[in-house]
Amino acid sequence: MPAGTLYRGREGMWSWVAHRVTGVLIFFFLFVHVLDTALVRVSPEDYDKVVATYKTPIVAVLEYGLVAAILFHALNGLRVIAVDFWAKGARYQKQMLWTVVGVWIVLMLGAIYPVLGHAARVVFGS
Amino acid sequence: MSTTETTASGVGPVEGGSYNVDNPAPYIEAPRQRTKKTPKSTRGNFEMAAWLFMRLSGVVLVVLVIGHLLIQLVLDGGVSKIGFAFVAGRWASPWWQVWDLLMLWLAMLHGCNGLRTVINDYAERANTRLWLKGLLYTATVWTILLGTLVIFTFDPNIR
């Protein structure tokens, strides 16, 4: 079998894949999110009951994942705009991707306590 | 388009003029150049508009959505404080009503167009594309209308 014939992609391809995957996930969440918010037109009790599930530890982890998807999609989207509209955008697309990843990591570290703190208090006791 | 001459040379009208002493050979348009004779494109610029919309709405959504995440998940106790009373407090202000309405419309249209692209890329059979996009557009229209209705008809004293 010839070695090294499989194209494994580079930064450009994998950021494109990640942009698609996060975009589709966010869209499906958005659909559900509009539906759950629509419960405010049914009754305060029904809305609060559903929102209570958003406060459980397992869903908190999902929310952290949602934040991760949204932040990557937002930051990489700005990079895509820069590639399209900035004359030197294409030349610096790799550097911009690593900037995106760096900012994303910092923001995700910052999101740990606000998004997961209450779940940790439930699981480990405050 | 001069069609005046059918002259000595016996050559009929030619695009861009005809043969004569000053114009010994007909001018031939570049193959893809649009001339008055080129049929009007039937496609329009929809794909370009969609491409541009993704970038413009994307920039606005970065601000709207990150602001939304900060308010709902980070500030003031994070998700723990969310409930009917919290929603009622925010939608008492037209500012947040407009914020949420704009976010709803832009995010749904941005996501709808994104999924349209994904469907076009991966669904190979024309019929599959037709059905998937039909489902997508139906879900998008319903979600936008439902969300808009909820924002405009919200009643804090429902009970």
Image: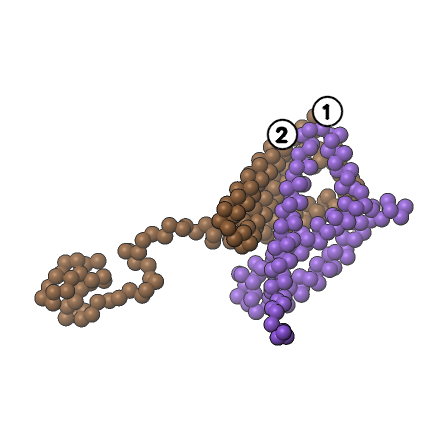
Chain colours: A purple, B brown
Q: What residue does disc 1 label?
A: B159
Question: Is the residue A102 above or below the residue A35 in the image?
Answer: below
Question: Is the residue A60 above or below the residue B37 in the image?
Answer: above
**Viewer-closest of B96 and B38:** B38
Percent across and percent down for residue A34 are 65, 39
Q: Residue furthest bottom?
A: A2
Label 1: state its secondary structure: loop
Instruction: Give residue B153's mark.
Output: 2
Question: Is the residue A49 above or below the residue A87 in the image?
Answer: above
**Viewer-closest of B64 and A32:** A32
**Residue B83 horizontal side relative to residue B60, left or right:** right
Instruction: Give residue A40's mark.
Output: none
Q: Earlier in the sequence, mark 2 or mark 1?
A: 2
Residue type at the position of mark 1 = Arg
Question: Is the residue A104 above or below the residue B134 in the image?
Answer: below
Q: Split into 4 quadrants, where in the image is the N terminus of chain A?
A: bottom right
The answer, for residue A65, to whether it is visible in the render is yes
